[in-house]
Image (cartoon, grey):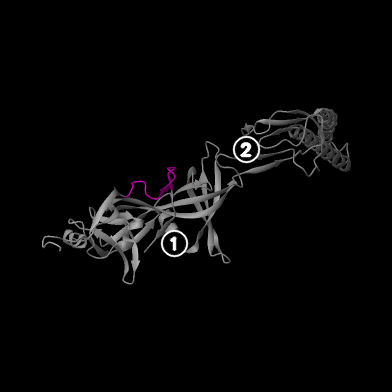
Amino acid sequence: MVGCSGVSKTQKAQAAGPRSVSVAVATVQKQDVPVYLTGLGSVTAFNTANIKSRVDGQIMKVNFVEGQFVHEGDLLIEIDARPYQVQLEQMQAQLFKDAASLRDAKLNYDRYVALIPSGSIAQQQVDTQKATVDQLDGQVRTDQAQIDNAKLQIVYCHITAPFSGRVGLRQVDPGNIVHAADTNPMLILTQLQPIAVIFTLPEDYLPSVSDQMKHGTLGVEALDRLNNKLAEGKLLTIDNEIDPTTGTAKLKAVFDNRDNKLWPNQFVNVNLLLETRKNSTVVPTAAILRGPQGTFVYAMNADKTVEDRTVSVALTQGTTTVISAGLTPGDVVVTDGQDKLQRGSRVEPRNPTTPSSNAGRKNGSGSPFAGTPGA
């Protein structure tokens, strides 16, 4: 016989009230949220030069090593200039000879002109002497042009860097004979500082980007395949057409590349900082749920019960969502365990978290995730 005072375990559980659900929560905060647009791009050198010889001759000296950084005007390769020096001396001697003949012809012409008033010389002879002076003057000018050409060939024997950049692999060695008609370059020079990145964005974003460019320079980040930030730069321009096959447009950004982390033809992910939304109400993206009535969150009350609250999403930026209506800073929302909840459920918070001030960043690298403007 069971005593009247006996109480079952079920009755004790019912008397203790409904069981609390363990959930993770976060506090709604107000902070500035950067809005990023992401695209795929490749690194492009501002200048690339295939260095070839403009004269025929033997290479006497190579003044660089592979991978060396050189400055504009640095001497790279010396070609034997002695044949052109000999030509120069020959042309100078010919000029000296023709100049002497010109001086003599001018003196004779002046004498003939002085004899005209006395009638002791025919006008035809004077005109012929004048033509001789002109012919010799033309020959002197031709000699001078040939001298200038010989000097130019000597200049071409000293190959210099057309711009500052990095030398690639060497294709020739001292002692080789090179020709102006050679198709293969002696070396390739590439400018790495600054350097450009060409990337694409959907055409729908172009009006926003164009409007923001009118108010100032837009920042750009280049990231590797793991979304680790490589360099920071600025947007230079938007291409003048849209690719009809992909619905995207090309944009060009420029980077100082002081640490040489960007290389020509390198694949990169690109984050374009479109704007920064000031004093935004933010929650972790994990708190956002979607139902028949739209987007909502479970908000925790002071008595540790929850209620479903409809919210308006203004922007999703990585792990952070900007709320335009439905929540206020200081509210507490559930970020994990919502599948066990309904309106009025009692909860027990665990590991309370708040939206990070670095929301939208990944791997501690300072690189943001892709932004999705709009609800």
Work out whether residue 116 can be spotted: no
- Up the image or down, 245 lies above or below 70; here it is below
Q: Is residue 295 left or right of residue 126?
A: left
Q: Residue tagged by mark 2?
A: 163
Which region shows up in magenta? 355-367
Q: Is residue 198 left or right of residue 271?
A: right
What is the number of the mark on residue 249?
A: none
Q: Is residue 29 left or right of residue 36?
A: left
Name the residue nearer the viewer: 81 or 23: 23
Majority secondary structure of magenta residues: loop
Q: Quadrant of the C terminus?
A: bottom left
> In what element is the residue under mark 1?
helix
User: Does the stretch in magenta take in 276?
Assistant: no
What is the number of the mark on residue 207?
A: 1
Question: Where is residue 126 drawn, in percent x and y?
Answer: 85, 39
Q: Is residue 48 left or right of residue 89?
A: left
Question: Where is residue 296 drawn, in percent x and y?
Answer: 30, 64
Which residue is found at the position 34% from the left and 51% from the top?
Answer: 33
Which residue is found at the position 44% from the left and 44% from the top?
Answer: 363
User: Does the stretch in magenta take in 359?
Assistant: yes
Q: Quadrant of residue 48?
A: top right
Name the residue nearer the viewer: 276 or 191: 276
Question: Where is residue 201 drawn, in percent x and y?
Answer: 50, 58
Instruction: Tell me the crowding category of disc 1: few under 14, some 14 to 19, or many 20 or more residues within 10 angstroms, Cα based.
Output: few
Q: Quadrant of the N terminus?
A: bottom left
What kind of residue is marked 2?
A: Phe
Name the residue nearer the viewer: 251 or 278: 278
Question: Where is residue 260 drawn, in percent x and y?
Answer: 55, 38
- Up the image or down, 64 lies above or below 246; here it is above
Q: CA distance from mark 2 to mark 1?
A: 36 Å
